[in-house]
Image (tube, rainbow, N blue to C red):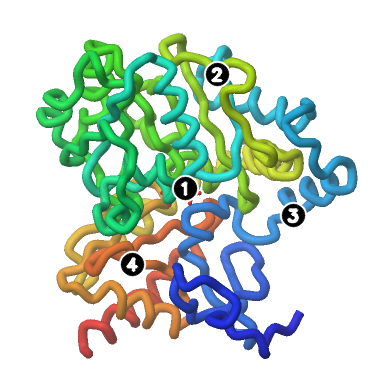
Amino acid sequence: MTTKSIKWSEVMQNNYGTPAIEISRGEGAYLWDQKGKKYLDFLGGISTNLLGQAHPTVSKAVKKQIDELGHVSNLYAHPQGLALAKKLQRLVGDTSAKVFFCNSGTEANEAAIKLSRLTGRKKIVSTLGSFHGRTIGSLSITGQEGKRIAFKPLLNDVKFVPYGDLKSLSKAVNRRTAMVIVEAIQGENGVVVPPVGYLKGIREICDRTGALFVIDAVQTGMGRTGNWFGYESEGVVPDVITLAKGLGAGLPLGAMITVGSKAPAFKPGEHGSTFGGNPVACAAANAAIDYITSRNVLDEVKIRSQELIKALEPLEGVSDVRGSGLLLGIVLDNEIANQLAQLCATHGLLVNAPNSHVIRIAPPLIIKKKQVNEFVKIFSTALKEAIDV
Ligand code: PLP
């Protein structure tokens, strides 16, 4: 399809600004723009395209499903949704876990907020720098003032504490707290990793006060960190897990999952979504999970991660490489991340700058050593250029 004559600014809201690149095709970890320029995609639809673009396993499952049954609404059960819920029970390690399907991360967190109200408590404790979504509820628990300011008043009874600081969290949480929500790694805030023991400490605080422990695994779930869920490295089990991004392997799908017996359950009529858990999106998720499991993709994720860290850490201009698995933040000595991301794109590499001194990478989980080498080559060239400017 040619869209040469359509100008973004004439047809789109300006909430994203005008994108510099128009992507028209993808295969594996590569994308092509309208002019035929090729890019190595180290952002993966912002931590979303688990198996990259046009993966034969996902494509086949999606095509088969759309030919058989495209959509049924939430009035009926369907095999792909049931099968996916069963798989998620296995992945979270609780055969009595209960799943609510939606379409996005913000909806998964909205569901968690509503569920927490059923405890009879209203207070929510979240962390500064966190990102939980753009709808009013999720925005209310997002700890970034710049994103909130124009939309006040937001929900009352939300307290923000510094991320990684157990003392402050312990002070803020009490027997009136409905839920504590955290990310295992703050992705949007620049891939910020909390101190070891942080999630364990939150588990203890929630156990002591009766507050629900909600982990927003929207960005750190579905194998991104080298484990199925980012929190696994601490050996904790939350009461509620929210998922999206990678879950649909490129299709829109979110989930809120209750684990164990502490979280209340929705009763009929208390929550819903027309498209949530759509058969085609669930078919993509089922195919991707089966592929990752049968090919031991998570072992590969860990190996690629080490290769990247080893190559990036010694580069001049890089002060730290943080994160886990294939969610890495390259911390720069200087505030040149935006210019650097643009230079990378000029050289045919897509990454992003969540803030002025960090480059985030979140490539498809199926990248090989060859793509790591290609990434390092382009990235170091662009970094040199950015420093020399
Ligand atoms: N939670 C986290 C941790 C995220 O990183 C994001 C998106 O970046 C969201 C929630 C919101 O997800 P969505 O954009 O699918 O609504």
Image quadrant in which the C terminus is located? bottom left
Disc 2 secondary structure class: loop
Name the front one of labels 2 and 3: 2
Name the front one of labels 3 and 4: 4
Disc 3 secondary structure class: helix
Q: Residue tagged by mark 1? A: 301
Q: Residue tagged by mark 2? A: 266
Q: Of marks 3 and 4, which one's residue comes earlier in the chain?
A: 3
Image side of residue 176 versus residue 291, left or right: left
Q: CA distance from mark 1 to mark 2?
A: 36 Å
Q: Residue tagged by mark 3? A: 56
Q: Residue at x 40, y 47 (%)?
A: 325
Does mark 4's beta carbon lie closer than 8 Å to ligand 1?
no
Q: Of marks 1 and 4, which one's residue comes earlier in the chain?
A: 1
Q: CA distance from mark 2 to mark 3?
A: 37 Å
Image side of residue 12 versus residue 203, left or right: right
Q: Of marks 1 and 2, which one's residue comes earlier in the chain?
A: 2
Amino acid, disc 2: Phe
Q: Give residue 256's position: percent from left, percent from top.
A: 52, 30
Q: Residue tagged by mark 4? A: 353
Q: CA distance from mark 1 to mark 3?
A: 20 Å
Q: CA distance from mark 3 to mark 4?
A: 31 Å
